[in-house]
Amino acid sequence: MSTTAQAWPGVIEQYAQYLPVSDATPRVTLLEGNTPLIPSVTLAKRLGEGVELYFKFEGLNPTGSFKDRGMTMAISKAVEEGATCTICASTGNTSAAAAAYSARAGIQSVVLIPDGYVALGKLAQALAYGARTIAVEGHFDACLRLVREISENYPVELVNSLNPYRLQGQKTAAFEVCDWLGRAPDYHALPVGNAGNITSYWMGYGEYHEAGMAESRPKMLGFQAAGSAPIVLGERVDKPETLATAIRIGNPARWEEAICALDESDGCIRAVTDEEIVEAYTELSSVEGVFCEPASAASWAGLKQLAGEGFFAGQECTVVATLTGHGLKDPDRAVAIATEPDKAPDDVDTIVKMLGL
Ligand SMILES: *Cc1c(COP(=O)(O)O)cnc(C)c1O
């Protein structure tokens, strides 16, 4: 007789004891979570001799980003409370997740996105999952202001990162890291936009530590894009710019919480340039075989920047870098950055010659 492995039930069911849910809470799930912690085979060496590096590849969630963890919670709670329509502002991944989980729950979704600044794959998702999608003339911050006002005055449930259940769902990624490693890492690196994710991880590590599931907590390392680095600069950025659209945010919703996470963990937050992001993005896919979206590559870009200053020198440590979203989210960027494919006729000799074989 063969034995059947216990099927992964999604993050709410898996970690119910750590979440604000009861038996009465519906589980609106696409079996998100349980994403792999991929060991780096090549790039880790660049950080230092004693560094073990892992990529928490969140691109392998059902809609291709970590936003699914928060959205399974937010939509489940919204349905529990009787909501029939959700609304969110998004740089793309939140809207993809909100649209998918709303469809799953059989309720309406509305998404407001900054016109012209959402990657093609993400826009395709919102539309495919059937969200009422509105492209607003303005930045993400304007979209957020609008959905806030609308949700305060009309019967629609706000599922942005202001929604507290989002952070609750997202903290499960920290549990998974500890479960896979058997301990907490020494450092955890993340891209920072609205700062919900860094806040969630810190919450998750703290709760696991308190529950006796991990002996220590990591130092949190946050990385913002240089053109939209309000937390690094200590002031709002009115015109955030970066090709990493998922972190193109000038006034983070979880700014204070992020500062707390950085202070309490004795971590740090840095800015990485778009050039550094593009280099990191290319390395992750072409050297390590892990294709993430540009914003996600800020994690690796930032780690390299720190290593360049001798940060990891002489340290024996474990570093986890979250790669927040899948590379296929932003196919235009991938093609624009790469060199164009060479053209050839339908002829073996020509192709063999081109390949130098
Ligand atoms: C949302 C998002 C981020 C930023 O996360 P915050 O919680 O807003 O800091 C980074 N990368 C990707 C791919 C995202 O979708």
Image: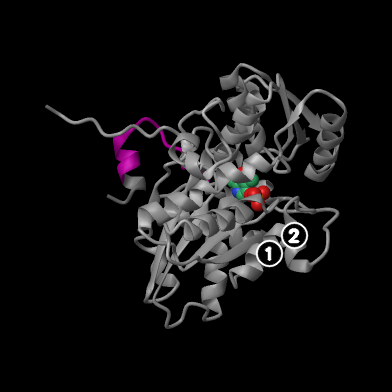
Kindly give the residue lying farthest to the left in the view shown: 1
Q: Which residue is mark 2?
A: 256
Percent across and percent down for residue 138 are 84, 40
**How many marks on residues?**
2
Q: CA separation, marks 1 and 2?
A: 6 Å
Does residue 269 appear anywhere in the picture? Answer: no
Mark 1 belongs to which amino acid?
Answer: Cys
Viewer-side residue, 301 vs 95:
95
- Which quadrant of the figure contains the N terminus? top left
Task: Identify the image quadrant of residue 86.
Answer: top right
Mark 2 belongs to which amino acid?
Answer: Glu
Viewer-side residue, 273 vs 36:
36
Residue 345 sits inside the magenta stretch: yes
- The secondary structure type at the circle numbered 2 is helix
Q: Is residue 87 left or right of residue 145?
A: left
Q: Is residue 25 above or below residue 143?
A: above
Kindly give the residue lying farthest to the top in the view shown: 106
Task: Identify the image quadrant of residue 192.
Answer: bottom right
Magenta span: predominant SS is: loop
Q: Is residue 317 left or right of residue 152?
A: left
Percent across and percent down for residue 94 are 65, 37
**Mark 2 crowdedness (10 Å alpha carbons): few <14, some 14-19, many ≥20:** few
Q: Which mark is residue 111?
A: none
Q: Are marks 1 and 2 in contact (CB under 8 Å)?
A: yes
Q: Is residue 284 left or right of residue 352?
A: right
Q: Which residue is mark 1?
A: 260
Residue 4 sits inside the magenta stretch: no
Viewer-side residue, 128 vs 61:
61
**Mark 1 crowdedness (10 Å alpha carbons): few <14, some 14-19, many ≥20:** few
